[in-house]
Amino acid sequence: MTIPSFAGLELLDTPVLICDADAALRFVNPACENLLALGSRELLRHALPDLFQPCPELLQALATALGQGASYIEHDLELKPLHNDAALHVMLSITPIDVEGCQALIELRPLDQQLKIANEERSLMQHQANRELIRNLAHEIKNPLGGIRGAAQLLEHELADRPELKEYTEVITEEALRLQTLVDRLLAPHRSHNRGPINIHEVLERVRSIALAQHPQGLAVVRDYDTSLPLLSADKEQLIQVVLNIVNNAVQALRGQGRITLRTRVARQITLARKRHQLALKLQIVDDGPGIPDDIRDHIFYPLVTGRAEGTGLGLTLAQAFVHQHGGSIEFDSRPGQTCFTVLLPFGGEAG
């Protein structure tokens, strides 16, 4: 059987399948391969119904479109792939065609993908607003801090004959220094970074060593690496800080007792920061802790938001800032027993 060529469809972001009158697949594009987590060679061995658990709505939609010779749309259809545990919620569109024995063009538009794109846009806008707020706030705080420290040092000199008061000036100096450090961290994302080719697994091994050195008993940090990944063009120190901040949060949620998994995979044909990339790094940091509290989930990346009394609320804000500087995205999924942070970073080279 000759497989027809549909070169233009291969460039689409929308997952597309083409089948004949018997529902045997004749074409799938890369976006469909990515959606169903199977390569085209394996997909083309199946008929359309064989890809999913029994779904009468899918068969009825195909029969209706072919029978009436008109497009058919199902706005919210749940499909359960046989080769993937996760159910897909898609908008299904079937269009009758007549090209080299092919009878139906099927589009599967993931509803969660549209929601993800909208969330990414909102995240970028919020990040830009946060950045301006932080920059202005940090500069407003930084200027008087120098005066406070200088005045405390002069006061300490004047009180040289009153040693019992020295501890008070020391408190002023130390707290001013602590605030200075906090301000420096607030301003850190806006400073230039040095990019170069890096191996992401060297970054992960560095963070893993730090975590295990701090918690040698009761903490397991598991590697799940795809060692075939290409090099990233990135700032190594910033990526170390990204991973370290997320891992530190996981360790604190686990109270040093539990399991953290560091996972790397490749993501294909993905849109990041409004640009389409052929290849991207998919880095996941998973822990088996209690999960993120419901009351902070919607604004966990906002500055000064934390679920711990001793936390600064800057770790995830800085991680998000560094990831966005690299043209990537960061998101999370959390429930009791599993929290997963996913970082996507382009390897370079936009899709043509």
Image (cartoon, rainbow, N blue to C red):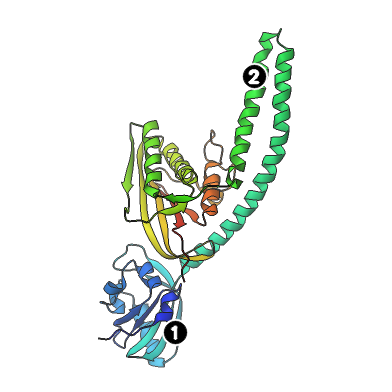
Residue 242 visible in the snapshot: yes
316 and 23: which is toward the camera: 316
Residue at 60%, 35% in the rendered image: 182
Judge the density around disc 1: few (<14), some (14-19), many (≥20) Cα neighbours within 10 Å. some
Q: CA distance from mark 2 to mark 1?
A: 75 Å
Judge the density around disc 2: few (<14), some (14-19), many (≥20) Cα neighbours within 10 Å. some
Which numbered dot is residue 170? 2
Which numbered dot is residue 224? none
In the picture as drawn, the residue positioned furthest to the top comes out as 161
Q: Position of residue 129 (x, y in %)?
A: 65, 53
87 and 221: which is toward the camera: 221
Q: Position of residue 189 (x, y in %)?
A: 58, 46
Of circles 2 and 1, which is in front? 2
Q: Position of residue 324 (x, y in %)?
A: 54, 54
Residue at 58%, 59% in the rendered image: 122
Q: How many marks?
A: 2
Q: Position of residue 224 (x, y in %)?
A: 32, 49
Q: In screen coordinates, is 69 left or right of 217?
A: right
Element class at badge 1: strand
Against 106, is 83 above or below? Answer: above
Quadrant the N terminus occupies = bottom left
Against 275, is 100 above or below? Answer: below
- Type of residue at label 1? Tyr
Q: Which residue is mark 1?
A: 72
